[in-house]
Amino acid sequence: NRRRRPLRRRAGLDFALKKGFFACMMQKTRWTWGALAVALSSSRCATLPTFGADLGKQEVSGAIQRPPYSAQKTYFGYVVPGAEPDELLDGKKLFYVYAWLPAVTPELGVRMLSPSRRYSSPGKGDLVDPAFVAAANSNIYFDPWIRLERCLTAVGPEDLGKPCAQWAPLGENDDAAELPAQPDGAHHNALVRVHSSMDDPSRALARGLYRIAFTTAKVGEVQGSFLLQVGAPIDLPGLILARSPEALRQDMAAKIR
């Protein structure tokens, strides 16, 4: 019988490895060229569940089914050991990812999963932190805690250059049972859905600046890779994620040119 060449040496496999598909698919099935073709045809791994909305959800045969968010943005990040936090609050290191919401929406969803390579790999249009690229093969993860906040004083792009005078908390989460388990088998990944309020202006999901605060729910350092997604049930051209308000402003300016 003709001896088969090791899969690692076959042409084109390096591309799959670099994109993270190989590590992700190996957790689900034995490799075949058909599986490799499926992986290369999509920027998302099958282990990442659909990011669905409360708006339009229904119960079918005892299970909740949610329509996918029409607008979604994804950020792949990595917190290196000893990283300086954006803020130290009550002894916890908080890190921020910022979002620009270009129009009013009835709902916003935010979810964070760690380690990211267990669930997905970067695709076209995703925001990828250089630290994530440098630690592409890392399996280090943390127990995410997230909180969505809105800046009440930033309603236009011109406000992004000013410090926010008031951040309003909208919702937070630690453990979400509907998300896949972490490598230790515990459901510690985080998800929060927030509905716009017509009665409370501070909780209205209006056009403007938002941020996602995150840390670890456990004692110790925040360290490892993560996948952060923001979704809305309506199309939102101009929805942007960035690591700072200044980066948001620059991204918006580049799109206008």
Image (spheres, helix red, strand yellow):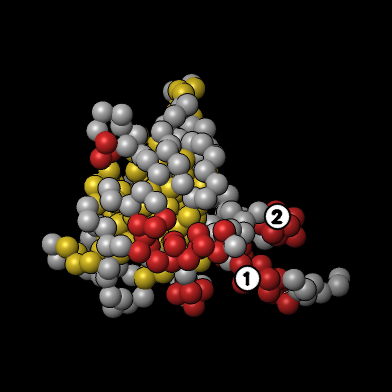
Q: Residue furthest right?
A: 1
Q: Is residue 187 visible?
A: no
For the point 31% across and 76% down, which residue is it?
83
SS type, badge 2: loop
Of badges 2 and 1, the one in the foreground is 2
Q: Which residue is mark 1?
A: 17
- Give the CA distance from mark 2 to mark 1: 14 Å
- The residue carrying pointer 1 sits among few (fewer than 14), some (14 to 19) or many (20 or more) residues within 10 Å by Cα, namely some
For residue 238, above or below residue 105: below
Decide which of tag 2 and tag 1 comes sooner along the chain.
Answer: 1
Frontmost residue, 138 versus 125: 125
- Count of numbered tags: 2
**Displayed quadrant of residue 13:** bottom right
Rendered location of residue 217, percent (x, y): 24, 57
Residue at (41% x, 69% y) in the render: 78
Residue at 86% over, 71% down? 1
The answer to which image quadrant residue 242 occupies is bottom left
Between 206 and 68, the residue placed more toward the observer is: 206
The percent position of residue 77, horizontal first and vertical second, equals: 43, 66
Measured along the vertical axis of the image, is residue 90 above or below residue 100? below
The amino acid pointed to by label 2 is Ser
Q: Are marks 2 and 1 in contact (CB under 8 Å)?
A: no
Comparing 118 with 5, the one in front is: 118
User: Among all residues in the image, which is located at the extreme front?
Assistant: 158
Q: Which residue is mark 2?
A: 41
Q: Residue at x 24, y 33 (%)?
A: 200
Residue 58 position, x and y percent, is 46, 24
